[in-house]
Image: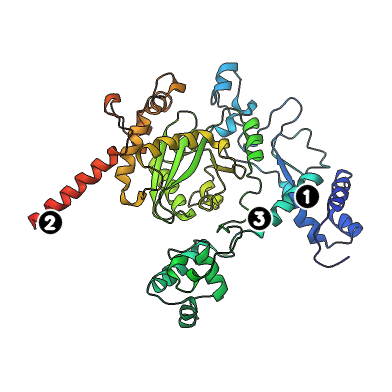
Amino acid sequence: MSKYKHLTLAERVLIQDRLNNGFSVKKIAKELGRPTTTISRELQKNSIPMKKGCYGRPFNDCAKRTKCNAVGICLECSQQNHSKCSLCALCNSNCTEYKKEVCPKLEKAPYVCNSCSDRYKCTLEKMFYMADKANEIAERMLKESRSGCNITEEERLNLDELVSPLIMKGQSPYHIITSHKDEIQCSINSLYRYISKGLFECQDMDLRSKVKLKPRKGEKKELKVDKQCRINRTYEDFREFNNQNPGVHITEIDSVEGVKGGSVLLTIMDDETGLQLAFLRKRNDSKSVTEAFNSLYQKLGEDDYKKLFPVLLGDNGTEFSNPKALEFNETGNHRSKVYYCDPSSPGQKGHCERNHEFIRNIIPKGEDIGKYDQDDINVMMDHINSYARQKFNGKTPYEMFEFIYGKELLDKLGVNKIPRDEVVMKPSLLKKRLKDKEDKEEEEKNDE
């Protein structure tokens, strides 16, 4: 067998069969003629987690479940009068005291529950190795790892700060690289490619030699912070999680662009009430998205944040390609789950997409969003959230959110109510604010 060859589907079928029959990792590796570490890594990377209970007991992996006396945490517990929330499969996602317990057997070989004798009486999250699913995950991971540009976001920002100003001065990439050998650790071809793919502030039009050439056809490459970010976070995984946790709160996230390469908006929409927030960002990168959610986390506090943002559903844009930064806070505590829609499937987060029509009514497509500030964006969203919706029987998103969560949370989010007769859904809303600012600046200059 050739060295460094990937496992085949047939080999994975054999691994599953041997695991079901209680074979050790070492014995499976010997039969396949593979290193033991290869089989061990395969089991740890490509096994499938399953949240299922056992006979007569629902799934519950909270470490406090045996001593918990809480009641009525979720709606189902209240309606069905469960004696304890530890007997409910939904309370884990609603309880602020929840702390996950992981079976210690999963921390050592064979890392899965295929042949575990205790799996029929265990209520913890289980791991199973299934050949077809493992093969699908491995192929997807291989494809993701080879896509996009081979550069981290931090390296991109550092290169952009160094290269773009020099390109704007008329310098060539060759001159820049030879002048900064110790600071630029990429080839001249890579530098041209990064500029061509729009990763820097400078563009092809700023390169005198490049604009003479006819652009080549090719697939656009994106900068992914984590190239394997979609593993276990696909829309299929989202639907499975949603089926296992009915009634879980979902938040749709997206970006709204103005001019290409300019400022963008991060939109965050509450799926239940239709309330939408928008954050102005100078760059469409993952760092600015993370900063926006960290800001919300600080404003709301841990309990309210987890209540509003337990599940985030976004598209495959590069700005959302750092899911761990959204799933965990700065101290490493878990706060949300992140999932991705299928490529070219905006309908999977249709509420957010449809609500963008209101934004386009005020900021038309192609208009520079960067000429506005965050206060302008907040005013725009206040008017949009105070606009009556037919699907809510004439109620506004603001009123729906206030009814379910209370005005205190709206105040924390900085959302204000606009009287219905004063709502403006046209570009004149922000144009008037811009004109007032210009007049004020002119007055200040005259006073000086």
Could you say where residue 423 lies in the image, as x and y percent from the top left?
30, 29
Q: Nearer the viewer, residue 438 or 227?
A: 438
Residue where numbered disc 3 is placed? 144
| Residue at image mark 2 | 445
Cβ–Cβ under 8 Å for marks 3 and 2 = no
Give the quarter of the figure containing the N terminus: bottom right
- Can you tell which of label 3 and label 2 is closer to the viewer? 2
Q: Residue 196: image x %, image y %? A: 52, 65
Q: Residues within 10 Å of mark 1 (few under 14, many from 20)?
A: many
Given residues 168 and 269, the one toward you in this image is 168
Residue depicted at 26% across the width and 28% down the height: 422
Disc ID at residue 318 = none
Of labels 2 and 1, the one closer to you: 2
User: What residue did someone put label 1 on?
Assistant: 135
Q: Secondary structure at mark 1?
A: helix
Residue 130 shows in the view: no
Question: Spatial distance from mark 2 to mark 1, Cα to Cα?
Answer: 68 Å
